[in-house]
Amino acid sequence: MRNILAKVRVQHRNIIATEIEEVFHAKDKQEAEQLFMKFIQKWKNIYPNLMNNLLTIRENIFTYMELPEGIRSMVYTNNALERLFKELKRRLKTMEMCQSEASAEKYLYLLLRYQNEKFLKRKLKNWEYYFQLYREQHSYTKENIHSEVIL
């Protein structure tokens, strides 16, 4: 969404933002694709290159729609990643300067390792329920999952 808004004129940003948000918050994949095609048709005369680029990656845009509705926002948002980068920046800023590039890399590694441990302890809201629902929809068993991982 940010990439789209960065490539449009300021006067169109609010309108495009609300329209593309409707697409991403649709109930299912078919509705999202219909809204997406309406969006493309409406703006293709003004932003032909942008709309053509969106059409080429169309298959990848709605991959998250196959997941249950409750966990979609966990997948398509990058808030956790932004928060991680902000934390790394904050911690490095207090150091002011590192003795070498290797020491900075080691410090970043240790920070990332610590953040990873924090994230591993974190419980996602209703994750077990939605994961079970996803497994039932796609009829996953231990054998299916194992064979897909190997492939």
Image: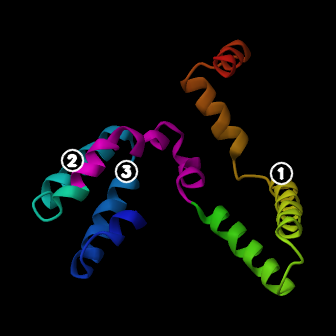
- Cα separation, mark 1 vs mark 2, equals 39 Å
Does the magenta portion include 56? yes
* Helix, strand or loop: magenta stretch: helix
Q: Which residues are magenta?
A: 51-77
Q: Report the mark closest to the observer, 3 or 2.
A: 2
Left or right, 88 with reference to 65: right
Where is mark 2, residue-wise?
37
- Residue 29 coordinates in the image, percent (x, y): 37, 40
Circle 1 SS class: helix
User: Which one is in front, 12 or 47?
Assistant: 47
Residue kind at label 3, given as amino acid type: Ala
Q: Residue at x 32, y 60 (%)?
A: 20
Where is mark 1, residue-wise?
120
Which mark is first along the chain, 2 or 1? 2
Are there few (<14), some (14-19), or many (20+) residues within 10 Å of tag 3?
some
- Residue 47 coordinates in the image, percent (x, y): 18, 63
Q: Residue at x 61, y 65 (%)?
A: 79
Q: Report the mark closest to the observer, 1 or 3.
A: 1
- Residue 121 coordinates in the image, percent (x, y): 86, 53
Note whether residue 39 is visible: no
1, above or below 128, in the image:
below
Which mark is first along the chain, 3 or 1? 3
Which mark is first along the chain, 2 or 3? 3
- Cα separation, mark 3 vs mark 2, equals 13 Å
